[in-house]
Amino acid sequence: MTTPAVPEAWLDRVRGLLASKPRVLLGLVGAPGSGKSTLAEALLQTFADVAQVVPMDGFHLANVQLERLGRSGRKGAPDTFDSAGYVALLRRLRTQAPDETVYAPEFRREIEEPVAGAIAVMPETRLVITEGNYLLLDDGPWRDVRALLDDSWYVETDDTQRREQLARRHERFGRSREDALAWVENTDEPNARRIAASRPAARAVFRWA
C-alpha cells in the first residue's frame, strides 16, 4: 500500500526543528485507528537518513502479565502499558551518549506481544518519531512524557472511517467481524474518548484529508 504524502507545511515544521536542535523528539498522538503509524512511516520515508520510529506500543505489558493483573479484556488501556519504562526510554533518548546505541522494544501484532530490543536508535539519529495513544495524558508516569517531546501532533481522521479501519485491523489479526466490532465498541472507543480529552495539550493538530 502506498504511504500517503505529508503536506509540505508539516515537513517544513520538522525541518525547522531539525535546524534548531541536534536531536528532535516528535510525538504523534491520537485515538486507535487515527493513522499515527501511517504518518510516522511517511515522515520516516521523508527523513530516512536521519530518523527512526520508536512506537509507544513496544511498552505493552506481555499477555502473561495482563492475565496476572486481570486486565486482558482491556488490553490497550493506559494501565496495560509499562508507562514508567516508556518515560525512562525517552529520557535515555534525550541524553544519549555519542558512543551509545539505545535499544527499544517493538509490539508485534502477529503474536500480540512486545519484543525487547527490536529497534536500534543510533547516536547519529537526529529525529526520533514516537507515536502512541497516551503521550498527552496527565495520569501517573504518562504526565512526564509531554515535557520530553520537542513537538506533539494530535492525529485525527473521520471517526466513522477510523472505527472501520480499526475493525478491519482486528479482523486481519484473527478476530471475527462480530468480535472485531465488539472490541472496537467496548475497548477501543472508551480509550479513544480518553485520548480525545488530551487533544488540547497537543502543540498542533494534524488531520488526514
Image (cartoon, helix red, strand yellow):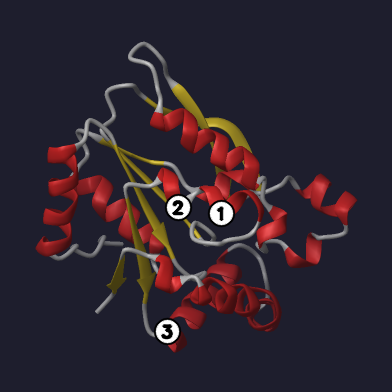
User: Is disc 1 surrounded by few (<14), some (14 to 19) or many (20+) residues within 10 Å?
Assistant: some
Q: Amino acid at mark 1?
A: Arg
Q: Counting residues from the N terminus, which is met first, the one under dot 3 or under dot 1? A: 1
Q: CA distance from mark 3 to mark 1?
A: 30 Å
Name the residue rendered at 82%, 46% in the picture. Answer: 65
Read off the residue under disc 1. Answer: 143
Name the residue rendered at 17%, 61% in the picture. Answer: 10
Q: Counting residues from the N terminus, which is met first, the one under dot 2 or under dot 3? A: 2
In the picture, the quarter occupied by the N terminus is bottom left
In the picture, the quarter occupied by the C terminus is bottom left
Name the residue rendered at 53%, 68% in the picture. Answer: 169
Does the CB distance between marks 1 and 2 fall below 8 Å? yes
Residue 162 visible in the snapshot: yes
Element at badge 1? helix
User: Is disc 3 surrounded by few (<14), some (14 to 19) or many (20+) residues within 10 Å?
Assistant: few
x, y (%) of residue 104? 51, 33
x, y (%) of residue 40? 33, 53
**Which of 137 and 44 lies nearest the eye of the viewer?**
137
x, y (%) of residue 151? 31, 53
Left or right: residue 46 versus residue 200 is left
Element at badge 3? helix
x, y (%) of residue 87? 55, 41
Q: CA distance from mark 2 to mark 3?
A: 28 Å
Q: Which mark is residue 112?
A: none
User: In the image, is residue 152 above or below residue 44?
Assistant: below
Read off the residue under disc 3. Answer: 161
**Which of 81 and 63 lies nearest the eye of the viewer?**
81
User: Is disc 2 surrounded by few (<14), some (14 to 19) or many (20+) residues within 10 Å?
Assistant: some
User: In the image, is residue 207 above or below residue 159?
Assistant: above
Read off the residue under disc 2. Answer: 146
User: In the image, is residue 199 above or below residue 173?
Assistant: below
